[in-house]
Amino acid sequence: MQAKMSRTYCEGVSGSETWKEKVMQLQQTLKNNYTFEGKGLHTGKVARMTVCPAPADTGIVFRRTDLGEDALVPALAENVSNTARSTTISSGNASVSTIEHILSALTGMGVDNAYIDIDNIEVPILDGSAKPYIDAIWNDGFQQQDAPRRYIEIKETIEIRNEEKGSMVRIEPADEFRYDIKVDFNSKVLGVQQASWDSSVLYPEQIGVCRTFVFFHEIEFLFNNNLVKGGDVDNAIVIVEHPVTDEQVERMSQLFNVPALKVREDGYLSNLVLRFPNECARHKLLDLIGDLRLCGGFLKAKITAEKAGHGINTTAAKAVRKSLRA
């Protein structure tokens, strides 16, 4: 994938200018339309979503095609309306939920401008990562646009803390972007995990492919409260933190409507094989990147996060937006 990426992005680059420098200078959008269809993780509703090219300076805008031509929801922090287990944005009567994975994918692939047409309220969960978007879009390359990329730069450090949860997001001025995240659920299975993203890390291969996760003991509660109607064994890593009985595992198999599952020696359910030892931390980084895209563009900053989630991520994005208006 990396070699093909270099060939794609080196088109039109001359002299000492590298493909990375060329990409970082200009805005870009997609070359084609890309359609995805599937269930929403929380609602279970099937949605058809098409990611489309958009003119320079558009940013990322969701269009609820089922609600009419005027049902537009720009992907901006001031439009955040809910952060319970995913990020929802709203404008007028239109809402779109679980937007973090597609926003992360577009950010990680360097897309400035896109329209996202969707015919229901929730973005499809697909495999629980950004990989389906990467697989569809990445090798086509991107359409460079005749406008400079507008980086988001802050003048002073912004730090958001939630003392009750022990979570923190700090955004500091910097010449280049860097994201560092530490994940600690007080879990003997996960331990304390860390992950980072900067210009040396290839997002499509090392971050975008990392899937969402859930603890075994949460799942039945979530099902009973209608919070994961679209969940299945193909789109979530399941962590078995506490001892469980054979009957509980059988119940899980029935909930997911799959053959008998097992608990592996490392404490994960047997439905998936980890793509990285710290895949859970990398997925939290994926989420952070998506949520902070709600700042309105590409942050040129150093971002440090601990025990982060959608609530504190989007609060930090709102603080950035407010600082830009000051």
Image (spheres, rainbow, N blue to C red):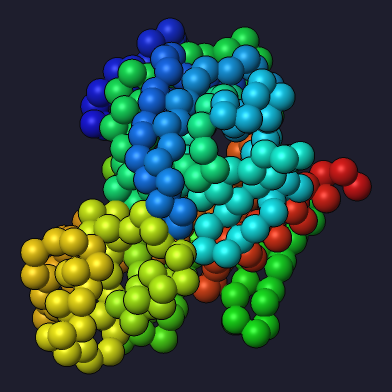
Name the residue: 51% across, 50% down: 98
| In the image, residue 152 above or below residue 310 | above
Name the residue: 76% across, 39% down: 92
Residue 224 seen in the current view: yes
- Nearest the viewer among 243 and 114 is 243
Q: Position of residue 39 (x, y in %)?
A: 37, 45
Name the residue: 68% across, 30% down: 72
Q: Position of residue 223 (x, y in %)?
A: 38, 69
Q: Position of residue 222 (x, y in %)?
A: 42, 71
Work out which residue is located at the far right of the displayed protein and give it. 326
Residue 207 seen in the current view: no
| In the image, residue 187 above or below residue 6 | below
| In the image, residue 117 above or below residue 182 | above
Name the residue: 29% across, 84% down: 241
Q: Position of residue 95 (x, y in %)?
A: 64, 43
Numbered label tally:
0
- Nearest the viewer among 167 and 13 is 167
Q: Quadrant of the N terminus?
A: top left
Q: Is residue 154 left or right of residue 20?
A: right
In the figure, residue 315 lies in which quadrant? bottom right
Q: Is residue 224 left or right of residue 113?
A: left
Q: Is residue 213 left or right of residue 313?
A: left
- Nearest the viewer among 251 and 178 is 251
